[in-house]
Amino acid sequence: MKIQKIKVKEIKGGITAPEGFLAAGINCGLRKSKLDLALIYSIEKCIGVAAFTKNLFQAAPIIVSKKNIKNDIQAIVVNSGNANAATGKRGIADAEKMCKITAQYLNLKSNNVLVFSTGVIGEYLEMNKISNGIKILVPLLSKKEHSLAAQAILTTDKIIKEIAVEFQIRNKKVKIGAMAKGSGMIAPNMATMLAFISSDVNIEKNLLKKLFKSAIENSFNLISVDGDMSTNDSVVFITNKMANNPEINEKTPKYIDIFYTHLLYIMQKLSRLIVKDGEGVTKLIEVSVKNAKTQRKAIKIARCVANSLLVKTAIYGEDPNWGRVIASIGASGEKFIPEKVIIKFGNYILFKNNTPIKFKEEKVKKYLKNDEIKIIIDLQEGKESTTFITGDLTEEYIRINAKYRT
Amino acid sequence: MKIQKIKVKEIKGGITAPEGFLAAGINCGLRKSKLDLALIYSIEKCIGVAAFTKNLFQAAPIIVSKKNIKNDIQAIVVNSGNANAATGKRGIADAEKMCKITAQYLNLKSNNVLVFSTGVIGEYLEMNKISNGIKILVPLLSKKEHSLAAQAILTTDKIIKEIAVEFQIRNKKVKIGAMAKGSGMIAPNMATMLAFISSDVNIEKNLLKKLFKSAIENSFNLISVDGDMSTNDSVVFITNKMANNPEINEKTPKYIDIFYTHLLYIMQKLSRLIVKDGEGVTKLIEVSVKNAKTQRKAIKIARCVANSLLVKTAIYGEDPNWGRVIASIGASGEKFIPEKVIIKFGNYILFKNNTPIKFKEEKVKKYLKNDEIKIIIDLQEGKESTTFITGDLTEEYIRINAKYRT
């Protein structure tokens, strides 16, 4: 599929923007005052695809949703405040119960419901609060409540993350909506990150799987906040096909491109929002590796630089300390020709021909005062490029994480 | 070789403790007031072995010393304040010049001298200051000045790191002395870490190489402060054989054990000192993985947990948040049986049978007030174990590194 160079049309409505979707969010008592329980519902059955954490300790809801995603999906229930992870058999029973109760009130089968949890690891869910919460949530479901749902899935996040887009497939309006959370434990192969994407697009399921996977590789798997991988990460896409567009399938390459462009747009936008809202992050850092021999190598080097605490703290300190970038490139384990490597901060060349380039310190320092910083590494050895997104590392990150649980 | 269970005899004298070694350290003007130039000298020729950073951007002095270590060695010159890294051909010429000048004043050949630099990356050395410094250093060489030499190689370190031991090889006294630096950019495969080890032991060179490599694997390669790998890491061992002990070789397994036990003792002690003095570190964390199927797996899991920012900040916050340990184990990419994993903080079992264990929060919190914390992960699947050493992550680390260069 090709990414189209078009101006994407954003619309309001978040997760409930597509036809037939309703949502609600409340505080059910798991957390003191913040919203902590969200419900997403489609009036028609959906096909769904999902990507789950590769962490080998998988949270109970992951185990349950992995099973249920194979069926038609009509509801997603999510709590924050408690990850229901490392909770053994009781945790799985609780996750199944969340599906069952939701199904009961919505007149569905348990296996038409997906369940997610995010928050502290290693504590059992307070199921009485959740049961009661679901009962309250169902009559609140509406088109309007999307932001409350988006709010209820947040943990240490400071901002609500939602987005929706609209496009045409042969005269039919198609919409995609989304909401996400995530600000710590963010690393490739996802993180303590949940993203729910709803749509009314009519698309063939195997094709959807393929496009979904590719879009994740090019968005959520190219970000990090702290390099830690969570037990609960998930990205879910469900569509009820209510847009009634002619089916997008392998025979409609043009439609594939249109759809993929918008799906990727949504995922990349959410990815950036997650990094920007990263714990303690004051600056977003784009690490671009250009002209590598392979994509894999470009990603490995970019990730190594983006995860370097020394690079992250240098950017926080607005210090043009490109030496730390050099050290990180060299630590990636990938081979390259030092004499060919060019390092730029924004438009300023700092290193070339294996030699430091004299630069106007004041100008580069001024550049580093921006909220978004570009580090560009040109390997000059091939044609593959990538951009990895991370944030700076600050005292605030330490403060948040030294005190999270208690 | 077997590690002997003996009480190692520590002696005074650091790097100059062995017969025939002299040292000196001064401020030559690279840094404002701190000492910045050290010289180690042996009155007799030494055989030497060394391990260098695996970072692909290697600093100029690494390139030069890698070549020279093949010859007999009689002097080591080291500057701090400037790493002479990413400095191209001029950097290499400068490193060679440091050897040449040192050789001149000591009446040696250039290739009998090793050279090392540590400090900021990407700036040229001020060679006039260094030339003049070496001239001043030579007449200051003495047995007594070992601590000044050890001080002159420090950068952000707060404490001088030196140690010496003495043991017997068939009625002959043998000594090993050492000094090291390192407090940030510390990760497996070494880090911005320099360690110089001197000895008067008579040992066969190929055997020495083997023992040296094994001791590094079990000490310096099992520590981390921030997961970053430097361009300048080096560990060097030189011996002038002046102890006149019968040669230690493959035919003297008992002597091998005695020597290896002391060499490993020195390296492990320096490793712990480096972590304890890690940038911003307030607590040393020992991550032990027990009963793994392979050593490689034990190390990979231990390293992943030890490098987790969330684990490091939890320990800093004295928070028994074992859920983050679980998440890190799962993120290591290694397979294990979740039901078998046991997690302990000190003597307190927190997780077992894939289920949280009720523990007295107050007692564990009290344990976490200690300066040294043990995290024990028992996989219950094999017989291999390892211990990886790291430090907590604090606001102070951020402050130091956001402001280092400027």
Image: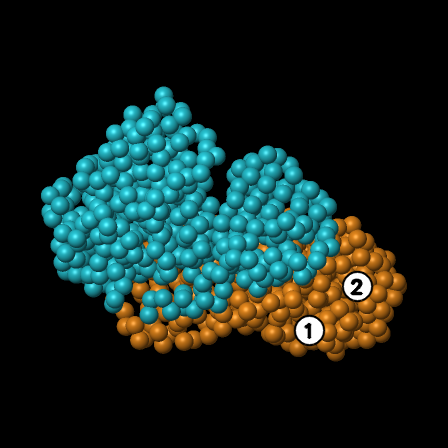
Chain colours: A orange, B cyan
Question: Looking at the image, do the residues carrying marks 1 and 2 touch, with CB atoms under 8 Å apart?
Answer: no
Q: Residues within 10 Å of mark 1 (few under 14, many from 20)?
A: many
Q: Residue at x 28, y 53 (%)?
A: B147
- Which chain is mark 2 on? A
Q: Residues within 10 Å of mark 2 (few under 14, many from 20)?
A: few
Residue named by callout 1: A151
Label disc, if present, on residue B51 of the rendered structure: none
Is residue A37 depicted above or below B105 in this figure? below
The quarter of the image holding the N terminus of chain B is: top left
Residue B237 percent location from the top left of the image: 31, 40
Q: Secondary structure at mark 2?
A: loop
Residue type at tag 2: Glu
Q: Residue at x 55, y 49 (%)?
A: B287
The quarter of the image holding the C terminus of chain B is: bottom left
Residue A358 percent location from the top left of the image: 25, 67
Residue type at tag 1: Gln
Do pointers 1 and 2 mark residues of a single chain? Answer: yes
Is residue B340 depicted above or below B246 in this figure? below
Residue A45 visible somewhere in the drawing: no
- Which chain is mark 1 on? A
Residue A174 percent location from the top left of the image: 68, 68
